[in-house]
Image: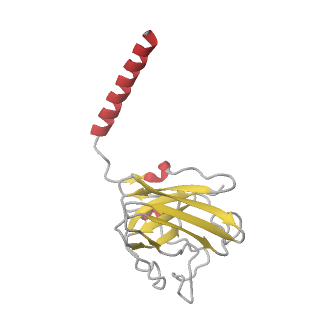
Amino acid sequence: MRRLGVLMAAAAVGFAACEMADDAPEPAVRDTTAMQTPSADDGEIEIQLMNSAGVQVGVAHVAQVGTGVEVHVHISGLQPGSEHGLHFHENGSCGAPTFESAGGHFNPTNTQHGLDNPQGPHMGDMPNIRAGDDGVADTTFVKPDTQLRGGESSLQRSGGIALVVHAGRDDQRTDPSGNSGARIACGVLRVQ
C-alpha cells in the first residue's frame, strides 16, 4: 500500500510539471533538428518530419535498393488532393518555422533543377507527393543512381541533409526550386 502511495505522489508531481511546461510560452523560432531520429549504421533510415510548430506530422524511410535509394513518405495534415514538392536539401538542419537553415536543394553535381529539365536534375530532386481525400500523402518511389553511402552520388554528408516538403507542386523544370513554394515540413537524414 505504501508503494501505491509513493507511485501516486510521483504521478502527481509529473502531471504538475507537464502542466507547468504547457503554460510556458512557445519560442518564435525553433530548431527541430535535435528532434530527428538518428540514423542506423545499415538498413532502413527513418526521418521524422516536423511542421513549422515543431509537431511531428509524418515520417519517411530511406533504404538502399540495388543501384538506387527507395524513399517512402507518409505525411498527414495536407489539403485533400494537394500536390507537394519533395526534395533533399543541402544542410542537415530544420530551423522552424521556415526551415531556411536546410539551405538549397542538394546539388553536389551542380546541375539544374527538375526531373524534366534536360540540364538536370539536382540530386535532391524527387517526384511530387499527392495527398488523398483524407489529407494524407503516402507514397514510395526509387531514386535511381543514388547511394546512401560513398562517392559523389551518395546522400552521406557530414552533418546530414534535410528532407523538405513544400507547400506547392514542383513543376520539375524551373531552376532552382521548381516554384514549389514555402517549406512546410522538414526532417534530417544522417547516414553513418
Where is residue 80? Give x, y as percent: 35, 69
Indicate whether 5 appears above or below 175: above
Q: Is residue 102 left or right of residue 153?
A: left
* Residue drawn where x is 68% and y is 52% of the image: 41
Identify which residue, 57 or 151, lies in the foreground.
57
Where is residue 106? Give x, y as percent: 55, 71
Q: How many discs mark residues in the rendered view?
A: 0
Indicate whether 13 appears above or below 150: above
Q: Quadrant of residue 111?
A: bottom right
Q: Quadrant of residue 141?
A: bottom right
Identify which residue, 131 or 126, lies in the foreground.
131
Where is residue 132? Give x, y as percent: 41, 68
Indicate whether 52 appears above or below 130: above
Point out the image quarter for the N terminus: top left
* Residue drawn where x is 40% and y is 79% of the image: 179
Q: Residue furthest front?
A: 133
Q: Is residue 35 left or right of residue 98?
A: right
* Residue drawn where x is 64% and y is 52% of the image: 40
Point out the image quarter for the C terminus: bottom right
Q: Residue furthest top?
A: 2
Q: Is residue 102 left or right of residue 110?
A: left
Where is residue 64? Give x, y as percent: 68, 64
